Image (cartoon, rainbow, N blue to C red):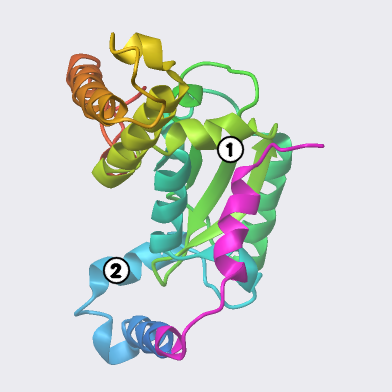
Amino acid sequence: MDLGYDIKDELLKWKAKPKLPEDEVIAEVYRILKKSIYKEKNILQNLKTYNKSFQLLNEEGLEEYLVFKPSEIKKTCIKLRLKFLDSQNYHFDVPYEAILKIKELNRTQGKDLEGFKIMGISESFRKRLPHTNFALFAPTVHGNYYLVHAWGEKMPWYKKIMAYPLRNFETLAISLMLFVLIVTMSLPTYLITLDRTATYWCGYRIATYFHLLIFFSGVSAYILVGFNKRFSGQVWQQEREFD
């Protein structure tokens, strides 16, 4: 049984979730506002944005399920501790299949696309690693991202578990409490107290739990500071913050 996962499948999970009616309304209003920028009377007022449109994808004609909002990109990066960076930060050649897809998009859209982004594990941007997975995106005129191509091997299931504690402070706290609980429950009573009359469920075990929680909280704080580990929500777009 293959328990691995890849970036494309994780992104598509957001599409499988039912959307609220108010979300659809907001999305439609946003599209209308974006389109108004390109009306003749608004071009001079929004010239900078208008000029950029010659290098960005029009969403009309694209597979809708492959167009992702920035919020969906961010949530996926935080969940799996991934980077979402400009393509020049990727130090290797992209697959030839991806180049062919870009050429086809250039042809159908009648423009030379720019501003490509790549999503992947932090350290795999700089060195070749086994079980790495990447996704190439092109920005659209509506501020979204179109998934052009995904490649690489499925990432092992435990990578998702390892990414959980560093999502944010809350997930770190939850992970610490669960880890300490498991350690405390696994300790035999004779290692907790010299009181031979103590049973497994006793006050000594509760006291041990809180003592270990304080200890491992200190260890975690030392690792975060000493090894410059930051939460995924802070570094998912940081070019200089690599694990």
Q: For label 1, count other residues whose C-alpha is less than 10 Å away and answer few (under 14), some (14-19) or many (20+).
A: many
The residue to which callout 2 is attached is 49
* Three-letter amino acid code of the residue under disc 1: Phe
Question: Marks 2 and 1: which is nearer the front?
Answer: 1
Q: Which mark is residue 134?
A: 1
Q: CA distance from mark 2 to mark 1?
A: 29 Å
Q: Tell me the quarter of the picture where residue 236 sits.
A: top left
Tell me the number on the disc at residue 239: none
Of the pair 37 and 22, the residue shown nearer to us: 22
In the rendered structure, which segment of residues is drawn in magenta?
1-24
Compare residues 52 and 188 and report the one nearer the observer.
188
* 52 magenta-colored: no
Give the tally of numbered discs. 2
Q: Is residue 48 visible?
A: yes
Mark 1 falls on what kind of element? Answer: strand
Q: Position of residue 215 (x, y in %)?
A: 21, 19
| Amino acid, disc 2 | Thr
Give how far across and how far down residue 240 sits, in percent: 27, 27
**Residue 30, image x, y percentages:** 36, 83
Examine the image and state in which quarter residue 96 appears. Answer: top right
